[in-house]
Amino acid sequence: MPLVRIDVAKDTSTDTVKAISDVVYEAMTRTANVPAHDKFQIISRHASDELVYPAEGYLGVSYTPRIVFIQVTWNTGRSTEVKKAFYQAVASGIHERTGIRKDDVWISLVEVNREDWSFGQGEMQYAPTH
C-alpha cells in the first residue's frame, strides 16, 4: 500500500519518467513484499528553482540538475536490510534504464500504520481487528 511521490526536473522526458516509475514499483514488489497491482504514484515535474539541493553535495554525495526525489509512504515494520535492498534496487535500476547517476537518486521513506490508509469509499480497509 505504498504511496510514491516522484519529483523530477521539468524537462525530464516521458520515457524517463515512465522508467523511474516502473523501477520504483518493481523494486517495491521484489525487495519489500509489496503486493502486485499496488501502484499508487504521484509524479511532478518542477522548474529548476523548485528542486533545491546542496550544490556542494552532502555526506559525500554530489548532485546535478537531473536529481530525482523519491518519497515512499508505506507500512512500518520493514527491516533495515529490506530498506537497503530497496534503495540499491531503485538507484541501480534508474541508472541502468535512464543513465541518471546513482548520486542523483534521492530517496526518503515515511512509515505509517496499516490503519492510516483509506483506498476509497471512506473506508479503513486495513482496520485493526480486536
Image (cartoon, helix red, strand yellow):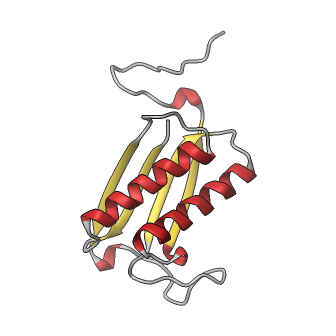
Q: Camera-side residue: 109 or 11?
A: 11
Residue 78 sits above or below residue 59 on the image? above
> Could you tell me which residue is drawn at 42 percent across and 34 percent down?
37
> Could you tell me which residue is drawn at 48 percent across and 69 percent down?
96
Q: Position of residue 97 (x, y in %)?
A: 43, 67
Q: Quick check: 9 left or right of 74?
A: left
Residue 31 sits above or below residue 48 on the image? above
Q: Quick check: 84 left or right of 101?
A: right
Residue 69 sits above or below residue 31 on the image? below
Quadrant location, the C terminus: top right
Q: Quick check: 30 left or right of 120?
A: right
Q: Camera-side residue: 44 or 93?
A: 93
Residue 65: which quarter of the image?
Answer: bottom left
Find the residue positioned furthest to the front. 96
> Could you tell me which residue is drawn at 62 percent across and 44 percent down?
32
Residue 98 sits above or below residue 55 on the image? above
Q: Quick check: 2 left or right of 14?
A: right
